[in-house]
Image (cartoon, rainbow, N blue to C red):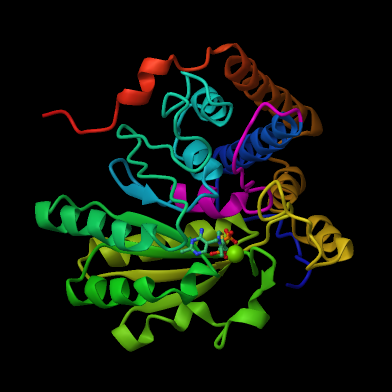
Amino acid sequence: MAARKTTAKPNVSADELKSYYKDMLLIRRFEEKAGQLYGMGLIGGFCHLYIGQEAVVVGLEAAAEEGDKRITSYRDHGHMLACGMDPGGVMAELTGRIGGLSKGKGGSMHMFSKEKHFYGGHGIVGAQVPLGAGLAFSDKYKGNGRVTFTYFGDGAANQGQVYETFNMAALWDLPVVFVIENNQYAMGTAQNRSTSTPELYTRGEAFGIKGEVVDGMDVLAVKAAGEKAVKHCRAGKGPYILEIKTYRYRGHSMSDPAKYRTREEVQKMREERDPIDHVRDLLLTGKHATEDDLKAIDKEIKAVVSAAADFSRESPEPPLEELWTDIYADA
Ligand SMILES: Cc1ncc(C[n+]2csc(CCOP(=O)(O)OP(=O)(O)O)c2C)c(N)n1
Ligand SMILES: [Mg+2]
């Protein structure tokens, strides 16, 4: 990806820009804190950080309306924060405490929110794709005008169940936006080593599904593409594919030896393409905010994240009896 030229006058209000800045910064600082807690041994099991990819969820949430649904993979903390789930509840789930969104029994990959229409958190690569189409099927059946954002990775895009889902979603004109978060790697495998046709946005062509490629380091580009996709779905025209080109700065998970790419590659992306720095530049060069305004936002976000971290350490571990609850649906 080429270095970006900052446009001083984007077609967006100062308040909107500030809210994207805040939302992305919350994810960044939250994930950094989660990384620290993991290093201190307070988080067990798997933990996949989203740092670098923040503009994807924040841009798409800006295109969503109340009642729209979202479902994603195990790299899910950013999605939860972006749709308004409580940072304390997410962090306490990471530390396995009763105050966590799954009462400390699910961990990083298994959190849900009925209220925010967030359907997980799925550890099996690609498993959320047919489930996302199922959610869209239910909305279509009810005729409620809602859309489901079904997120998956570039690695998952090579899975068979994705294509069975594309077929059914197109056949039934389901209101689902398939969001391929192409961060260029699937664990330690670069896309060019695993993928015969790298233009993932064309993968729906055989089923008659339109798609487009989007700069995932530019929150405004993501929002614009999201709005177009959502409009298509709400008009009853069926599914839409967005291949969003992004990049993860951290390893696949906390236990990644990171031998498959150079430090320089990561550093270059951070320096030239960072999605948060981009909005920061837009705010400053457009005179929508001063350095002091941004410092105040940074302080506010830090306070939210440190309160979440405190809660995640103070909340007790679930009592043993909790092992037998939430197993079966209420009769
Ligand atoms: C069915 C299945 N196969 C393999 C794995 C192991 N696995 C976990 S994540 C992953 C890579 C997925 O990469 P991608 O879809 O690009 O998502 P990203 O991690 O980059 O967000 C693999 C192979 C799994 N969890 N499930
Ligand atoms: Mg990937």
Q: Is residue 128 visible?
A: yes
**82 sits to left or right of 234:** right
Q: Quadrant of the N terminus?
A: bottom right
Looking at the image, which is closer to me, 51 or 108? Answer: 108
Residue drawn at x 69%, y 66% is 188
Residue drawn at x 42%, y 76% is 211
Looking at the image, which is closer to me, 252 or 234? Answer: 252
Q: How far across and down, in percent of the image, does residue 29 sit?
A: 69, 34
Say how many tags the image has. Answer: 0
Q: How far across and down, in percent of the image, does residue 71 sit?
A: 39, 51
Residue 60 among magenta residues: yes
Task: Decide: is 107 above or below 4.
Answer: above
Q: Which residues are magenta?
A: 40-62
Looking at the image, which is closer to me, 239 or 299? Answer: 239
Q: How far across and down, in percent of the image, does residue 287 sit?
A: 73, 42
Residue drawn at x 36%, y 62% is 129
Q: How far across and down, in percent of the image, does residue 227 sit?
A: 40, 59
Q: Quadrant of the C terminus?
A: top left
Name which quarter of the figure residue 7 lies in. bottom right
For the view shown, which residue lies furthest in the right direction?
264
Of the four image quadrants, the one with ligand 1 is: bottom right
Q: Is residue 62 visible?
A: no
Task: Decide: is 101 above or below 245.
Answer: above
* Main secondary structure along the magenta-highlighted residues: loop
**234 sits to left or right of 89:** left
Residue 41 among magenta residues: yes
Task: Decide: is 195 above or below 148.
Answer: below
**325 sits to left or right of 265:** left
Residue drawn at x 37%, y 86% is 205
**253 sits to left or right of 141:** right
Looking at the image, which is closer to me, 187 or 12? Answer: 187
